[in-house]
Amino acid sequence: MAGHRIFGTPFAAVYPLYLAKLERKGRTKEELDAVIAWLTGFDEVALAQQLADESTFEAFFEQATLNPDASQVTGMICGIRVEEIDDPLMWRIRVLDKLVDELAKGRPMTKVFRTP
């Protein structure tokens, strides 16, 4: 999937879509930001900077420090099994999609964060 158009899409263009999905399901911006922080290591300031800079997904994940427990994220998202995605950037994007989806479906934060 090298060169997929999502790689060049600004994260700031997708963030409001994630937020709208979660708010429709009764979740909050704080929960979304916590999920992003868990996956990427970005604190509130760093995330705000990524959004302000309109970093592409590629740049966003290049600057992230991926949580080692992200490899525990499995399942289907957009009809694709997360654990079968070969492209590292696409895998990171789909892991984020999966985490947002789990949050929207009402999964407790401890489960989303893969806390034992």
Image (spheres, rainbow, N blue to C red):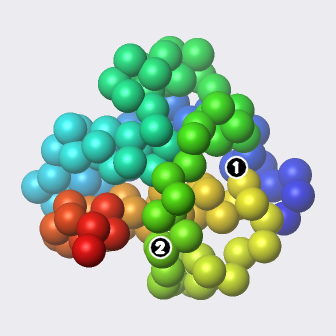
Q: Residue 6 carries which label?
A: 1
Q: In which quarter of the image is the N terminus?
A: bottom right
SS of the residue at dot 2?
loop
Q: Residue 23 at what x, y percent from top left? A: 19, 49
Assess disc 2: are there few (<14), some (14-19) or many (≥20) residues with their C-alpha within 10 Å of its C-alpha: some
Q: Residue 113 at what x, y percent from top left? A: 31, 62
Assess disc 1: are there few (<14), some (14-19) or many (≥20) residues with their C-alpha within 10 Å of its C-alpha: some
Q: In this view, does 3 lie to the left or right of 25?
A: right
Q: Residue at x 56, y 49 (%)?
A: 66
Q: Residue at x 53, y 23 (%)?
A: 50
Name the kind of residue labelled 1 in the image. Ile
Decide: is 55 above or below 72: above
Q: Which residue is drawn at 26% across and 74% down?
A: 116
Name the kind of residue labelled 2 in the image. Val
Q: Residue 81 carries which label?
A: none
Task: Give the mark nearest the N terminus, 2 or 1.
Answer: 1
Residue 11, located in which quarter of the rendered image? top right
Decide: is 37 above or below 74: above
Residue 94, located in which quarter of the rendered image? bottom right
Say if residue 31 shows up in the picture: yes
Say if residue 78 shows up in the picture: no
Query: What residue would you read off at disc 2?
Result: 73
Q: Is residue 41 left or right of residue 93?
A: left
Q: Which of marks 2 and 1 is in front?
A: 2
Compute the Cα span from label 2 to label 1: 20 Å
Q: Which residue is drawn at 78% across and 73% down?
A: 86
Choose between 70 and 15: the one closer to the eye: 70
Choose between 31 and 110: the one closer to the eye: 110
The outermost residue toward the left is 26
